[in-house]
Amino acid sequence: SVISQPAHNETLPIALNITKTFEIGGYAHTGGGRPVLRVEISLDQGETWLTSTIDRKERPNAFGMYWCWVWWAISIPVADLVECREIWCRAW
């Protein structure tokens, strides 16, 4: 899975946006024709995980296989990013 938003080294003025939300998004693929069932992000280096929303454009082929990447996104309150050092993602 890949994080495409925020961009690498993107900065967010926390004080100016503390009451707003910030969208984190990207794309994911599991390989082997298996569908992506879940994409999660962590703001605390893997201690807790938040479930994102998956935008699946592809339908399975005649053999029930999925070959395309899916897009995912999650809106996070900016206040939750105050102590965040890294954003992690995982998919399966």
Image (cartoon, rainbow, N blue to C red):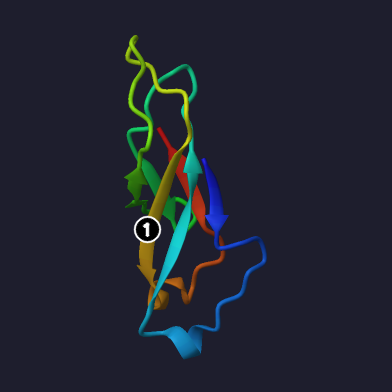
Residue 92 x/y as whole percent: 40, 32
Which residue is identified by label 1? Answer: 74
Q: Residue at x 55, y 77 (%)?
A: 12
Which residue lies most toward the bottom here?
A: 16
Kind of residue indicated by mark 1: Ile
Which residue lies most toward the right here?
A: 9
Residue 80 x/y as whole percent: 39, 72
Q: Residue at x 34, y 51 (%)?
A: 52
For the residue carrying disc 1, how many other residues have a C-alpha within 10 Å: few (<14), some (14-19), or many (20+)? some
Q: Is residue 43 above or below residue 18?
A: above
Viewer-closest of 73 and 91: 73
Q: Is residue 88 above or below residue 76?
A: above
Q: Is residue 89 above or below residue 31?
A: below
Q: Is residue 92 above or below residue 52?
A: above
Residue 31 visible in the snapshot: yes
Residue 89 x/y as whole percent: 48, 47
Q: Residue at x 36, y 51 (%)?
A: 49
Give the structural element (helix, strand or loop) at label 1: strand
Residue 45 x/y as whole percent: 49, 55
Q: Quadrant of residue 7?
A: bottom right
Q: Residue at x 48, y 34 (%)?
A: 69
Residue 47 visible in the snapshot: no
